[in-house]
């Protein structure tokens, strides 16, 4: 098959967010799947790496990064500071792309910003649209919608329009949190991922420190009650019809599922999770309903808490660009559901073409 007869997939990865390295790892996995023996006759790839300062690199430089086997070996040399002009309009070869595959985790990716930019190319995009991405990224708006729809969540408070550089404000908020929520609590930036900026707080002084840590990432913050739970996850793919994967469980040795335990330590992944079939079906139903509620389609990973003492299900959050790293749950869930990584990536491209 001639290269021009194949679909050209445009991978965008890296970015300025605090999940930059995760994005690079995800992009390497997707790139490898697209050029695998299974898919090589269907797809070819152009890639665009965005460095940590927002500078876009061209296809040749970006492909070098994707082919690099050792972690971050060549990334550092590409961390040039931006010039005054915005360079992506000159760097992206808009006309050559048939389908975009954005893999920017966190800010400017999962929040819908990249989808808004790519929409002007009038080419299909793998994943959700602007609205679903923005709502799925913002924990406060997401929770408010789910509360309205009576989708089960842990008790929470949200903080907006507060100056947390003021110690008095932080002190007052810590008192309010202790009055309204049971300890311990989790303090989270409203817009972040991979558990970055999140803290578990058991005392008032820890709450104050946690508020400061979260505020350094986002001025909008969510505080949740910390229950004794199991961490369960479900993958979603589709557009007009959404399909749920098997339910998976992450068993970790740390106190809670933080960034290090997600990407650096050996967790026990159990797929399918050892749960009652009725609970599994309830989770799948909630996963699909919650994605529909936020206008999320294409693909997503829906995270749940299952309280150990009561077996109550609580929706945690939705990730609209889940990770594709070697330790990421999303591809594992679909592998257990009958789609290996090569098939999964091709399926996601096909879904985007049907929109």
Image (tube, rainbow, N blue to C red):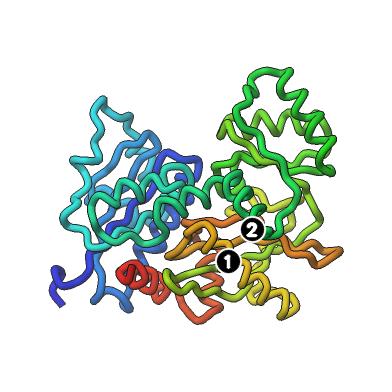
In which quadrant will I find the C terminus?
A: bottom left
Q: Is residue 5 visible?
A: yes
Percent across and percent down for residue 340 are 46, 76
Q: Is residue 259 visible?
A: no
The answer to whether 295 is drawn above or below residue 200 in the figure is: below
Camera-nearest residue between 69 and 324:
324
Residue drawn at point x = 50 percent, y = 40 percent: 18
Camera-nearest residue between 264 and 157:
157
Percent across and percent down for residue 10 are 28, 57
Q: Earlier in the sequence, mark 1 or mark 2?
A: 2
Q: CA distance from mark 1 to mark 2?
A: 10 Å
Residue assigned mark 2: 149
Hey, which quadrant is residue 55 in on the image? Answer: top left
Q: Nearer the viewer, mark 1 or mark 2?
A: 2
- Residue 27 relative to residue 172: left or right: left
Percent across and percent down for residue 336 are 56, 78
Secondary element type, mark 2: loop
Whether tag 1 and tag 2 are in contact, CB under 8 A, the answer is: yes
Hey, which quadrant is residue 90 in on the image? Answer: top left
The answer to whether 243 is drawn above or below residue 196 in the figure is: below
In which quadrant will I find the N terminus?
A: bottom left
Q: Which mark is residue 128?
A: none
């Amino acid at each position: 098959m001639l290269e021009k007869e194949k679909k050209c997939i445009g991978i965008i990865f890296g970015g300025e967010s605090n999940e930059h390295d995760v994005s690079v790892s995800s992009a390497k996995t997707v790139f490898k799947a697209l050029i695998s023996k299974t898919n090589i006759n269907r797809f070819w790839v152009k890639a665009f790496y965005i460095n940590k300062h927002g500078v876009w690199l061209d296809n040749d430089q970006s492909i070098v990064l994707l082919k690099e086997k050792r972690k971050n070996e060549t990334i550092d040399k590409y961390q040039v500071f931006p010039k005054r002009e915005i360079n992506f309009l000159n760097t992206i070869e808009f006309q050559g792309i048939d389908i975009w595959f954005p893999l920017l985790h966190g800010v400017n990716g999962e929040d819908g910003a990249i989808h808004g930019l790519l929409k002007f190319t009038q080419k299909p995009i793998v994943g959700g649209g602007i609205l679903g991405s923005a709502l799925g990224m913002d924990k406060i708006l997401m929770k408010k919608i789910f509360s309205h729809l009576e989708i089960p969540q842990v008790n929470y408070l949200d903080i907006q329009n507060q100056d947390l550089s003021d110690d008095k404000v932080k002190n007052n908020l810590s008192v309010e949190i202790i009055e309204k929520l049971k300890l311990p609590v989790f303090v989270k930036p409203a817009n972040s991922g991979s558990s970055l900026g999140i803290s578990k707080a058991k005392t008032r002084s820890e709450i104050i420190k946690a508020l400061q840590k979260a505020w350094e990432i986002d001025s909008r913050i969510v505080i949740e009650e910390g229950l004794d739970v199991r961490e369960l996850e479900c993958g979603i793919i589709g557009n007009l019809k959404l399909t749920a994967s098997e339910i998976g469980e992450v068993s970790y040795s740390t106190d809670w599922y933080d960034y290090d335990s997600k990407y650096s330590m050996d967790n026990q992944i159990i797929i399918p999770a050892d749960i009652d079939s009725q609970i599994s079906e309830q989770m799948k139903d909630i996963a699909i309903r919650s994605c529909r509620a936020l206008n999320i389609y294409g693909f997503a990973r829906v995270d749940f808490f299952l309280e150990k003492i009561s077996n109550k299900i609580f929706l945690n959050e939705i990730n609209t660009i889940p990770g594709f790293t070697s330790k990421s749950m999303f591809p594992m869930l679909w592998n257990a559901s009958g789609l290996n990584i090569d098939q999964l990536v091709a399926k996601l491209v096909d879904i985007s073409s049907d929109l």
